[in-house]
Image (cartoon, helix red, strand yellow):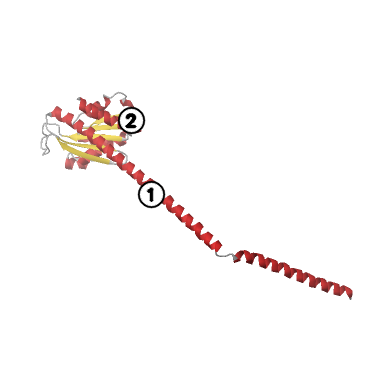
């Protein structure tokens, strides 16, 4: 494998290792070349789960849960099959990321209008899936190498875009939480202000609490004195 592809593979692996993610591969036309490229990197057992090489329709159906109706109506080389291959491999392996490759390396397939050099690459995670295609020119071996190169670049691009999207969503949530906290603080401050104004505008409440108490005390004193007078009067008789 050439140095450029090895460099791209290393870039993808660095991204996986940064977050402790694992990867799995589902290949058709490349015959395991992508899996071989990745496992050429030392320490692959830390982030590489397993891979599939599924050429026939039956193998794609049985091993990767690709829909039979889809294969029979559209063939194996299209975006939907690429996504289903990737997602099926991811679910079967339990990996965080999956890459699939389905294309026509050459020579031309019998009864197929799809050109040699056409490839679809599927990328799937637990939260998103995507497929990209490209048309290259070359012999069978050259096309297989180009397909692997394209698959690695596609995986890195999808990974980076997903990272930016996730970071943006996190930033939006943090901003929303901060704004909610500010609004709550304003609301509480307004409640406190209104309570203070209400208390300051009604000083009579303190007086009304004191005066009735004093009046009650005076009335009791009068009643007591009168009852004392009656008592003394009755005694004098």
Q: How many marks?
A: 2
Q: Is residue 13 or residue 227 the one in the foreground?
A: 227
Q: Secondary structure at mark 1?
A: helix
Query: Residue 95 falls in which quadrant of the image?
Result: top left
Residue 203 pos. (x, y %): 59, 64
At 24% across and 39% down in the image, what residue appears? 83
Q: Does residue 55 show up?
A: no
Q: Quadrant of residue 27?
A: top left
Q: Camera-side residue: 198 or 29?
A: 198
- Examine the image and state in which quarter residue 227 appears: bottom right
* Quadrant in the picture for the C terminus: bottom right
Q: Is residue 105 left or right of residue 230?
A: left
Q: Position of residue 221 (x, y in %)?
A: 76, 69
Question: In front of the other: label 1 or label 2?
Answer: 1
**Residue of label 2:** 17
Q: Residue at x 85, y 72 (%)?
A: 232
Residue 235: assigned label: none
Instruction: Find the residue positioned furthest to the right.
Output: 237
Q: Residues within 10 Å of mark 2 (few under 14, many from 20)?
A: few
Mark 1 sits on what residue? Answer: 176
> Is the C-beta separation of discs 1 and 2 under 8 Å?
no
- 98 vs 185: above or below: above
Q: Position of residue 141 (x, y in %)?
A: 15, 27
Helix, strand or loop status at disc 2: helix
Give the mark nearest the N terminus, 1 or 2. 2
Q: Residue at x 88, y 73 (%)?
A: 235
Q: CA distance from mark 1 to mark 2?
A: 31 Å
Judge left or right: residue 211 versus residue 99.
Answer: right
Q: Quadrant of the N terminus?
A: top left
Q: Residue 206 versus residue 178: which sits nearer the camera?
A: 206
Residue 125 location (% of width, % of height) = 30, 38
């Amino acid at each position: 494998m050439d140095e450029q592809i090895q460099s791209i593979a290393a870039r993808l692996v660095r991204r996986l290792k940064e977050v402790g993610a694992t990867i799995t591969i589902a290949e058709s036309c490349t015959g395991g070349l992508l899996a071989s490229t990745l496992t050429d990197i030392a320490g692959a057992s830390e982030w590489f789960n397993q891979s599939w090489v599924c050429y026939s329709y039956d193998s794609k159906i049985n091993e990767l849960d690709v829909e039979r109706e889809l294969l029979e109506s559209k063939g194996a080389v299209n975006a939907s099959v690429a996504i289903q291959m990737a997602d099926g491999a991811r679910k079967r392996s339990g990996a965080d990321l999956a890459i699939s490759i389905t294309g026509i390396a050459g020579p031309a397939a019998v009864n197929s209008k799809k050109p040699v050099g056409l490839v679809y690459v599927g990328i799937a995670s637990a939260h998103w899936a995507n497929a990209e295609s490209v048309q290259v020119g070359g012999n069978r071996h050259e096309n297989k190498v180009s397909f692997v190169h394209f698959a690695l670049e596609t995986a890195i691009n999808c990974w980076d875009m997903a990272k930016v999207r996730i970071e943006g969503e996190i930033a939006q949530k943090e901003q929303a939480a901060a704004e909610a906290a500010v609004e709550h603080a304003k609301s509480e401050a307004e409640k406190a202000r209104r309570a203070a104004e209400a208390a300051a505008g009604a000083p009579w409440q303190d007086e009304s609490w004191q005066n009735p108490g004093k009046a009650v005390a005076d009335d009791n004193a009068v009643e007591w004195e009168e009852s004392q007078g009656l008592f003394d009067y009755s005694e004098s008789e």
